[in-house]
Amino acid sequence: MKSPLILNNFWLILFKAIINRSKTLLVLCILFFIFCGYFAYKLPINADSDSLILENDKDFKTYQFINKTYATQDFLMLAFNPKSGDIFSEVSLQILQQITQELNTMPQVQSTLSILNAPLLKSSPKLDLQEALEINPTLLSPLVDKDLAKEEFLNHPFYSKNILSKDLKTAGIIVYLKKDTKLEELENLKKETKTSSKNALLKEYKQQAQIQTTHTINAIKALKNKYEGLYIGGIPLIASDMIAYVKSDLITYGSTLSVILALMLWVFFRQLRFVFLTLGICLFTLVVSSGIFSLFGYEITIISSNYISLLLIINVSLIIHLIVAYLEFYQKFPNASAKNLLYATMLAKKSPSFYAILTTIIGFLSLMFSNILPIIHLGAIMSIGVSLALIFTYILFGVILALLPKPKSIKSLPKWHEKLLNACANMGLEKTKIIYPITFLLVLFSLYGITHLKVENSFVNYFKDKSEIKQGLLLIDKQLGGTIPLEILITFSKKDFQNAPLSDFEAEFNALESEDSYWFDSQKLRIAKIIHTALEKEEFVGSILSLYSLSQLLQSLGLEANDFMFAFLYKNTSTSLKAQLFAPYANINENQIRFVLRIFDSNPNLQRNAFLFNIQEKLNKLLEGESLKVEINGAMVLYNNLLQTLINSQINTLALVIFAIFGVFIFIFKSFKLSIIALLINLIPLGIIFGILGITNIPLDLMGVTIAAISLGIGVDDAIHYIHRFKEEIKRNPLKIAIKNSHQHIGSAMYYTTFIIVVGFCAMMSSNFIPTIYFGFLTTLVMLLMLLSSLILLPALLKSFHRGNLC
């Protein structure tokens, strides 16, 4: 018996210290707020590929190897679709020329490729092939016949579906961005040294590079506004627009929520002190948390951009429970001093508040086991933020109210409020024969829907239909050979001549074979043709470029595409032409050939995992018996790895959360039955949401996968507060009275907080990012269902399974 008494004395001493030294603590809090505010302003936002990958993804290492080995460049894809529909008209070509001229003046643009500057070898009747190779005429050359040029563009393996659509109505402009050599140096340095200073330097430089890229993209967007029919796409644009959406959402969430919360708090409590108290504590927690995130080196990604809403919602919920308890003590003891009311409130709510926040932290900490970097970061920053919310809510609640005079009066709850809570309690107590069958059917519905969950997502569908980025991505996807890159690497086994004795002829032949020009042998060209032609038949594959594209080009010029011709071309072409025709598709040092594909991301029938599996299976079958290795990689593979991990991540994090929260319930309630009941009333609404997702074919995405852990972490707070109150009431009242009293006192705080949570998540539906909208809607729905479950199903279960007599 001494241990609880000692603990209570500790809390009493702590709360007295907070209340009695309120002025000193307030000054210290203001200074800490200013300090953290400085760093909060510098909190970085990141939307590059590193923020959307699995941790320790082996395919990402291959992806980095490809980027380095094949000297790939970031590029933007522009599509020009003139209103006239004729891309080869004088007006259209003049506009296209103006666009490319303006693009080439931009500092970060290295070069552009379009129908204007693409070399044409068959469209000049007055030139033979050798002359054409020397001059490299383009569409704007007076020697080029436009009708022949159209034909050459349509049948050119490097141009068709890349810089010109099959219907001749859309021209593509590939904008190559300058390679950032300094960034590469810093990344290599980071790998070698792995010190915190190098990490900080790399992050700082990445932010600067990101700003530069954003300036370039904004300049290109300005061209879009200037020239009608111009659309933009490409991975750098997606990353840039995601950053813009994150910044916009951060501002929207903060401002919208502040206004709505202020109105709702006024409606609930009708006193300005409680409105400003709540908003002030929330602002303090938000700024301090953001500052600490920045100090710890965390970055805000598209997934963690909703941390403002989440933190505000959790913090407001915590404060409302304190305010409701404060007003309840005021009604019971109207003559008590302001300080005594604060002591009583803080002591009464310390346990449920602590355990409510603990379960919320457990929910967020579970996200750190997902193996998905942005979700791990969300779990980390929210765990820190929620912990800070608990600490500073109690400090500031005690400090501020201690400095203010006691309210002269308080508003009584409206009659409809009492009637609603009584009706819910009565329904739970008297309609169990209806409630249990409905609950059972909902559980069956949930289980059926969960078995039909899927994770198919496309980048195109991450944006609203009317957004510029989606319109551009759709046009490029459908008319210019797809949007999502996919790469296939074929690595040949190296021949070993070291152990075998060689004749003079064999030695001379092998010496010749070892020369770069003789690397392009008949086997490699045959393999390139087999794979390329097989890929062309695939429904979802758009543009394909490989060594076989060069073979097709040679054949169209009337030349024989054999190993001798390849060796001759490789040995005699200029360095720049070699870089265009050979370097992207063959690596002699690594003994590899490479296929560069783009996939139709907007095709509704595309099932990414099945598609990649089928490609791997077909290639393995085609190349059976060949001494080589097949690897499929690229942005699509990394993205698919992420998607396929979502289901396992959901199961693992949910299992972890359930296990941990159940352990906390056992510790708090000291009752197995009450712990099971508290868990069930939250799991059933959560199951209904996933059942809806499965039956309606709404796919899980990067944000949807966090719903279970977050909703359960937040939702169980009500169960903890309710059952904590119920245990107090049942000590001195019969079961029915105990339930009704719990409804009257805790029920009001429960639906106050739930409505505020709902409004908070509804604010997310104003986002431009579709996963955020889905997340806001689904979390809103699950929180409403959890409220209904707590107000109706919970009393029914307490009546059926708690020992005691009804009266």
Image (cartoon, rainbow, N blue to C red):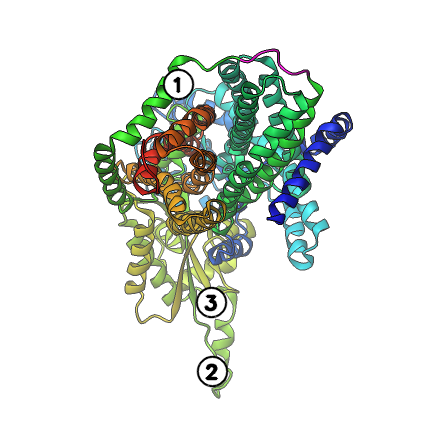
Q: Counting other residues with Cα less than 10 Å from the Cα at mark 2, is it few (<14), some (14-19), or many (20 or more)?
A: few
Q: Residue at x 41, y 51 (%)?
A: 655
Find numbered disc 1 in the image and state the secondary structure of the residue it sits on.
helix
Q: Quadrant of the C terminus?
A: top left
Q: Which mark is residue 58?
A: none
Q: Name the amino acid, label 1.
A: Glu
Nearest to viewer (mark 1 / mark 3): 1
The span picked out in magenta is: 405-410
Q: Earlier in the sequence, mark 1 or mark 2?
A: 1
Label 3 sits on residue:
518
Q: Name the amino acid, label 3.
A: Tyr
Label 1 sits on residue:
418
Label 2 sits on residue:
505
Nearest to viewer (mark 1 / mark 2): 1
Does the magenta run of residues contain 718? no
Image position of 774 with respect to 668: above or below: above
What is the CA distance from the residue labelled 1 to the residue labelled 2? 102 Å
**Residue 477: image x %, image y %?**
36, 36
Q: Name the amino acid, label 2.
A: Phe
Find numbered disc 2 in the image and state the secondary structure of the residue it sits on.
helix
Find numbered disc 3 in the image and state the secondary structure of the residue it sits on.
helix
Q: Earlier in the sequence, mark 1 or mark 3?
A: 1
